[in-house]
Amino acid sequence: MGRTEDARKFYARLMAANAGSADPRLETAFAEVPRETFLGPGPWTVIAGRGTIATPNADPIHIYQNVLVALDTDKGINNGEPMLHAMWLGQVEPKPGETVAHIGAGTGYYTALLAKLVEPHGAVVAFELEEDLAERAKANLASYRHVEVIHGNAVAHPLPLSDIIYVNAGVVAPPAAWLKALKPGGRMIFPWRPSETVGLAVHVIRVENGFACLPFMGSWFIPCVGASVAEAGAKTPTRERAARTRSIWLTEDKAPDRTATAVFGDVWFSSRGIGADRRR
């Protein structure tokens, strides 16, 4: 076994252990997808604290740890923290045959992991707004026949009916169209950024009578163009109120009531649990 493969297998074990997932396929996916393929040629720029550090050379062994690798330093775009994504993947539990919409795909590394987890008969539709990153993702994912990469804004572009919507850009609220794109039992995970001081990862499940949700960890992503600015009259939450949120509603289905923790136009958040959340 070569040094890089050995490092990747150990990295995969660490990611799976931190995810807390009982699915052994998660470790397999991290072990099989070569991260360096999606980063471009090394040496790589690693984000550390408020600065950056260059890897000493182009040996991939340097990026098989929990480090942020810059993709576009001018725009603040990076490859994402592997441990965070491992925990997110453990939350949404992709299954073979499912359809995934990946919003904010970057150069496609986590798209590839999602694709591994839904193969052989699943599909991943990945959206990336930055043209250069989208082109790189298309090239990197060319061998994944069940993956489609779309250069475009997922806020304006219709999503496929999805078992999972995996969002990698901060939103003040998920657009109503995204919630409607979830199949019954479908899951969404997104970075909730309703204000400058609140940043939470939220796991949503579409249940029979609405959308159960649970904020489960801190999370900070670059803003999602078209869904990151609150409209006038929005009710924004404190971090404490945001953390108490247990369901999301479409205003067309139910008007905001006294349980509302946040209101953003046609979507609002409530402290009242429903469906799947009551079983937690």
Image (spheres, rainbow, N blue to C red):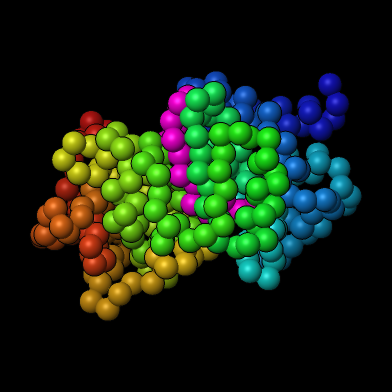
**Of residues 50 and 184, which is closer to you in this image?**
184
Asked which quadrant contains residue 176, the reply is: bottom left
Q: Which residue is the extreme one toward the bottom?
A: 232
Q: How many marks?
A: 0
| Quarter in which the N terminus is drawn | top right
Does residue 10 appear to the left or right of 89 in the view shown? right
Instruction: Give the residue drawn at x 41%, y 62%.
Output: 156
Given residues 116 and 68, the one toward you in this image is 116
Asked if residue 2 can be seen in this view, the reply is yes
- Reply above or below: 46 against 211: below
Left or right: 233 as drawn, with respect to 107? left
Residue 244: x percent and y percent? 26, 52
Q: Residue at x 76, y 43 (%)?
A: 36
Q: Position of residue 105 (x, y in %)?
A: 57, 50
Q: Position of residue 61 (x, y in %)?
A: 81, 39
Magenta span contains residue 3: no
Residue 10 shows in the view: no
In the rendered structure, which segment of residues is drawn in magenta? 87-107
Q: Nearer the viewer, residue 48 or 90?
A: 90
Q: Is residue 90 magenta?
A: yes
| Rendered residue at 33%/58% (across/down) | 175
Quarter holding residue 8: top right
x and y percentages locating residue 248 in the rendered image: 24, 51
Q: Which residue is situated farthest in the right direction here?
A: 57
